[in-house]
Image (cartoon, coloured by chain):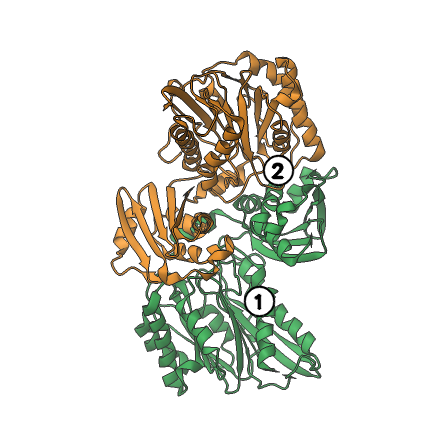
Chain colours: A green, B orange
Amino acid sequence: MPVNYATPAPDQLFPVAGVRLGTAEAGIRKANRRDLTVIELAPGSRVAGVFTKNRFCAAPVHVCREHLKSEGIRALVINTGIANAGTGEPGMETARQSCAALAKLMDVSAAQVLPFSTGVILEPLPVDRLKAGLPAALSSLKADGWHEAAHAIMTTDTVAKAASRKVGAGGTVATITGIAKGAGMIRPNMATMLGFVATDATIAQPMLERLAKEAADESFNCITIDGDTSTNDSFVIVATGQGKAKFESVGAPGWEEFKREVIAVARELAQAIVRDGEGATKYIEIAVAGGRSVSECKAAGYAIAHSPLVKTAFFASDPNLGRILAAIGYAWNNDASLADLDDTKVKVWLGSNGEETLVAENGGRALGYKEEDGARIMKAAEIKIRVDLGRGGQQAKVWTCDFSYDYVKINADYRS
Amino acid sequence: MPVNYATPAPDQLFPVAGVRLGTAEAGIRKANRRDLTVIELAPGSRVAGVFTKNRFCAAPVHVCREHLKSEGIRALVINTGIANAGTGEPGMETARQSCAALAKLMDVSAAQVLPFSTGVILEPLPVDRLKAGLPAALSSLKADGWHEAAHAIMTTDTVAKAASRKVGAGGTVATITGIAKGAGMIRPNMATMLGFVATDATIAQPMLERLAKEAADESFNCITIDGDTSTNDSFVIVATGQGKAKFESVGAPGWEEFKREVIAVARELAQAIVRDGEGATKYIEIAVAGGRSVSECKAAGYAIAHSPLVKTAFFASDPNLGRILAAIGYAWNNDASLADLDDTKVKVWLGSNGEETLVAENGGRALGYKEEDGARIMKAAEIKIRVDLGRGGQQAKVWTCDFSYDYVKINADYRS
């Protein structure tokens, strides 16, 4: 059960002019579930993406990077069940075949199709089943297919993740709608496993590419569930240019506001992934300030977010907060510049439900800290850890969840 | 229950001339358990230690570093229950008081005592209880106290850890005996939480200091349970000089052989910690070769060893081995030089009970790999993952354990 998150209703997901979505049951890994999605884009759409930095990156990620070198992308094809990662040259072949098969049915070229896969690593993609499912997916294409597509891309997710808004943009209105999936193997390092955001605005290609990177950095690149960077992380932004909003240069009226809204949609999706983290019972924001760089702040945030001891203490609602100090103390593993961190300058606060208490300062427990305050704050489903490193003016946030019996159960059982 | 480990019997732990050990129930955190240990060293003993690199390092670690600047150490005082870490200046004061109180009873100076603590972080050490327990600990001092001391330093350990051997050394015989504790918050980065090894050999101080570092690097610095580097990690070697073996220079006969045996004892203790890892049901050796540096090999080994997905798969005996590839793929997080790792050059083998199978090569599943082989190998309690990075001649090993429901249970309950 996700922490304070529910999938928006179908009518809360605004169609984006120029985008149609269709799904099918292809039986990729399991029968009787929608596991194949096609997203069709109108001619003239611009696309930008960011992808995993995992060195065992999946075959479809390689193919996406290749196809994004030229413009004119007309479709995305997405399967769940098999990640098509750790599959070597045969995996590249099946990814290419997926594109070619869809391209033929749509009468475009294979290079105009982007492939995405998610699921088990190291097993071959049954590409014939995927190809056999394409006609059904195409025949179900519709502009209001976002809700169904959000469901069809799930794996261990317990809820579908989607976000949508209409935003004022330079005197007109633009629509932004996105979906994402992911619940485990989540520590995106470029973007997360399958995030798709589309808008009907016109956006110049270089601006769209920077936007993809910036939105990922402010959203998917700030979350972690288990510290495992996936082989398949992909985040794609589509601008169909079918609406009235036009951003052909960074000086275009409304661009900054529009950008903020795209980032907000990406962040909503990223946070939904954490709220639905495998086995999650708590949603935790870690806000780190006072670093000499953003990297230092992220290093401390991730050290806390990845510590199994911190995560299990949160699961137990046990204010065993020394574990947070220990994690900050070894954060230099993530960024060597923290090797000279002065522990007497660090402050740590714990908060929930609008209440906040200073836990640690001067290298130890804050004089005013009371165990019963910590215990009460820890009981909430949403908790905020605030850290001041006391050595600079930079800051960063990391979102994560706790570590429960169910995380072990889900990951000990997954595949079986 | 530890994986294939039992504490040696009391008579298997050879006394070391010049060392006596005593324990007491001081009620530091809980009543009715031996939680205070004193190790008395004969005059002329030489001592060297390595300590945690955690920036929130515990007060006793600060004091140990200070006191090791001069020679003449005569005693170690060790408490469990409270780590005296994250305790600021008051914590430094209680650590100093512990030394002073023991020094007074022994008629030595406070600077001749090394303090060690293990337990909960961020809570004050009840130093009056510690002091009150010292006379009882002193009155129980005995040369064959190793077995009792190994028990008295435990926290969440389920078994006491000790190792002992007599070794030929330059035509004579030296005794080496050691104890260690630790089961969680284990990712030593200099040494682990409380490892003590003593020998009756005479060893020149600079050689002893290098030996402490080398033995730690080959043992405690190769293990991980949860990736959490403790605030209190301390590993100390004592050479009492009361035996016949003498190593006053690196050219001394038998020094290399003796060194190997000290490292073997340290490794036995370190591996015992992993076998008794919190909730562990499997003991896993990860041997990485073919790196351009030892650091690259350790980076890949730790990425695998820390992945919750890999660890839960081992708990389930599920050969979901793509997770190992994914971890190798993001190992550049630990050592940036792996950012150009060529995934098609990497090979991964899985083995147990003298059997080994090639799992992955050429960027994907090995042609000869059969799921039933992987499943059979995974069922064993001791498993070996072997990786060839295919880019150099260096190698390293990491020892770890799986991740079970009980890890969550133990760490969600600890303190309560």
Observer-side mark, 2 or 1, equals 2
Residue on which the image places disc 2: B57
* Residue A106 drawn at (x, y percent): 40, 85
Query: What label sits on residue A216 in the rendered view?
Result: 1
Q: Taking the image as drawn, is residue A125 in sight?
A: no
Name the chain under label 1.
A
Please state which amino acid type lies under the numbered disc 2.
Cys
How many numbered marks are there? 2
> Relative to A349, does residue B219 appear above or below in the rendering?
above
Q: Residues within 10 Å of mark 1 (few under 14, many from 20)?
A: many
Please state which amino acid type lies under the numbered disc 1.
Ala
* Residue A34 drawn at (x, y percent): 40, 70
Q: Is residue A361 left or right of residue A53?
A: right
Q: Residues within 10 Å of mark 2 (few under 14, many from 20)?
A: many
Q: Residue furthest front?
A: B251
**Residue lying at 34% horizontally and 62% vertically, measured from the top left:** B364
**Residue lying at 51% horizontally and 39% vertically, measured from the top left:** B188
Q: Kindly indicate the quadrant of the structure image that contains residue A358.
A: top right
**Residue lying at 36% horizontally and 60% vertically, measured from the top left:** B345
Circles 2 and 1 in contact, beta carbons < 8 Å? no
Q: Residue furthest top?
A: B139
- Mark 2 residue element: loop
* Residue B402 drawn at (x, y percent): 41, 44
Q: Is residue B256 left or right of residue B378?
A: right
* Residue B104 drawn at (x, y percent): 66, 15
Q: Taking the image as drawn, is residue A377 in sight?
A: yes
> Relative to A141, does residue B99 appear above or below in the rendering?
above
Q: Are marks 2 and 1 on the same chain?
A: no
Name the chain under label 2.
B
**Residue lying at 37% horizontally and 73% vertically, measured from the top left:** A95
If the image is split into quadrants, where does the C terminus of chain A sit?
Answer: bottom left
- Mark 1 residue element: helix
